[in-house]
Image: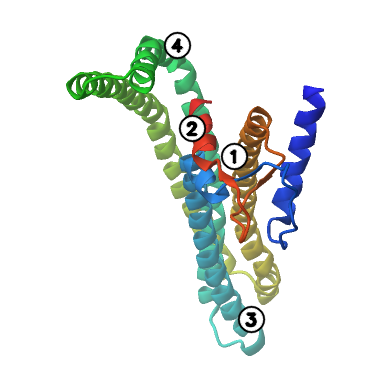
Amino acid sequence: MKKNKLVKISAIIAAALLISACSTNVRGPQEKIAVINWEQAVSAHPQYTKLEQGEKILQDLLNKRKGQEELAKAQLSSLNKLRSLRQLSQQSFMEADFNTRMVEQREIENAKLQKFVAQAEAEADSKLAARKTEVEEAYKLKLFNLRALLETVKMKPDERQAVEKQLQHLQQERGVQIGELQAEKRRLVDAKVLPYKEQAEQRMREMAQKYHAQAMQQLKSPEERDKEMLDTAPKALNNALSVIDREIDKQQEKNDSLKKQINQDIESQAVKLAHERGYTIVFNKFRVNMKAEDITDAIIKALKKT
């Protein structure tokens, strides 16, 4: 019976989220209604900071893409003028082609670097995982007991202040140790990444020399070869953009997945709370002329404990 009621409440919450912008129907006196400030709950979710960072990364990629697209359009415009008016010299085209190829190569190297950094960070996390767990376990019970003491025991002001000071001291100690682990992780990652970056820069220098040598050779080639390069330039420019487009899609998928997880966590806590308190419907927005209990703080508190 309880399982069926929980399923029903979950369905009602899902329906409420879909119809929250609709008009309010008259509710029966037997219904117990709750409301969640969804945006506030999302912003209080433990993963919200990570989502904000992901959104910033995505925006940076979009800005970078826009800049590259403008550069590509400018270069294509120049190349089209070369094609139609024959006013630009062959050397000008080769410089544009060189820049385009170097942009594409740089994006390839950046993609490889990001993959390498992710692997280095994963290895560092794995290496430090046991020590991080030790730190967490060393403070977990102490912090829990102090919080429970503050929440459940009625104390004199000076006693409460002493407990709060002790809690703050433990949190600071834990923060220092976590910070030391983060610094060590950074050192481990840098030890691998910095040499790789130098290798990547060396590859770029070698590629630049190679492209420059090819350009010098092509400057001596007949006009037919110049025409062939003019025909392939738009494709090269599009290829340069496609590299960052893939990064944008990948980051967007990460952000969407994290948003979905956050919403599911909130909905799960709402369903659980609705079952415990006997709510028949939960809305995700405050509605006019409807008496509903605001359970936002309770949801946020539950999220922070997970």
SS at badge 2: helix
Q: Earlier in the sequence, mark 4 or mark 2?
A: 4
- Residue tagged 3: 80
Q: Mark 2 — residue?
A: 301
Q: Is residue 186 positioned above or below 257 on the image?
A: above
Q: Relative to residue 241, is residue 302 depicted above or below?
A: above
Q: Secondary structure at mark 3?
A: helix
Give the residue type at disc 2: Lys
**Three-letter amino acid code at the position of disc 3:** Asn
User: Quadrant of residue 84 in the image?
Assistant: bottom right
Please indicate whether residue 98 sits to the left or right of residue 190 in the image. Answer: right
Q: Residues within 10 Å of mark 3 (few under 14, many from 20)?
A: some
Q: Which residue is mark 1?
A: 262
Residue situated in front as seen by the camera: 134 or 193: 134
- Badge nearest the viewer, 2 or 3: 2
Residue in the foreground of this view, choosing between 165 and 33: 33
| Amino acid bearing label 4 | Ala
Amino acid type of the residue tagged 1 in the rendering: Ile
Residue holding disc 4:
130
Name which of mark 2 and mark 3 comes first in the sequence. 3
